[in-house]
Image (cartoon, rainbow, N blue to C red):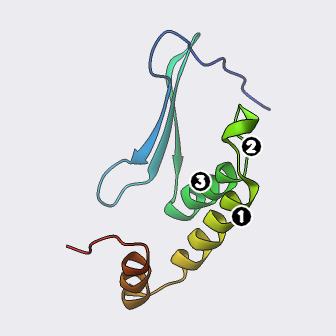
Amino acid sequence: MIDYYRVADDRPAISYGPAGTDGPWILAVTTESEGRVEIALDEQAMYDLWIETRGVPWPFAEQHDAEEERLARQVVHAVNGADKNGLRAALEALGVRDD
């Protein structure tokens, strides 16, 4: 069975993030018929969703750069398997301060 909901256009409709320090990630959608609908995802499923959506074309073609998207996916895949030292090195290479 598939439940089908239409996202409400009149308010912020989609958000995601951790439910708490040890809880699942929540993908929340404000729908026209049911109000707020939440989908609980474990951390890996949330990363999989994020990686998947990074590769989806932008609504306007002039905003989409296929090479940039491919490179971003490669960075995310590498980060998922990196240790703390690798993450620090990546942040430094990208010019991000590790405070």
Closer to the chain start, of discs 1 and 3, is 3
Of helix, strand and loop, which one carries label 3?
helix
Residue type highlighted by circle 1: Arg
Q: Position of residue 13 (x, y in %)?
A: 50, 23
Residue type highlighted by circle 2: Pro
Residue type highlighted by circle 3: Trp
Alpha carbons under labels 2 and 3: distance apart: 13 Å
Q: Quadrant of the N terminus?
A: top right
Residue located 33% across and 70% down the image: 96
Disc tally is 3
Of helix, strand and loop, which one carries label 2?
loop
Alpha carbons under labels 2 and 1: distance apart: 11 Å
Q: Position of residue 63 (x, y in %)?
A: 66, 40
Q: Which of 91 and 85 is in front in this view?
A: 91
User: Crowding near pointer 1: few (<14 within 10 Å), some, many (20+)?
Assistant: few
Q: Where is residue 32 in the image (x, y as percent from the top left)?
A: 57, 11
**Camera-nearest label, 2 or 3:** 2
Residues under numbered marks 2 and 1 in contact, where contact means CB atoms less than 8 Å apart: no
Q: Quadrant of the C terminus?
A: bottom left
Residue 67's place in the image compared with 74, above or below, is: above
User: Crowding near pointer 2: few (<14 within 10 Å), some, many (20+)?
Assistant: few
Residue located 71% across and 51% down the image: 65
- Mark drawn on residue 50: 3
Of helix, strand and loop, which one carries label 1?
helix
**Camera-nearest label, 1 or 3:** 1
Residue 40's place in the image compared with 38, above or below, is: below
- Mark drawn on residue 70: 1
Q: Nearer the viewer, residue 10 or 22?
A: 10
Return the residue at label 2.
Answer: 57
Residue located 36% across and 47% down the image: 19
- Left or right: residue 6 versus residue 2 is left
Residue 86's place in the image compared with 34, above or below, is: below
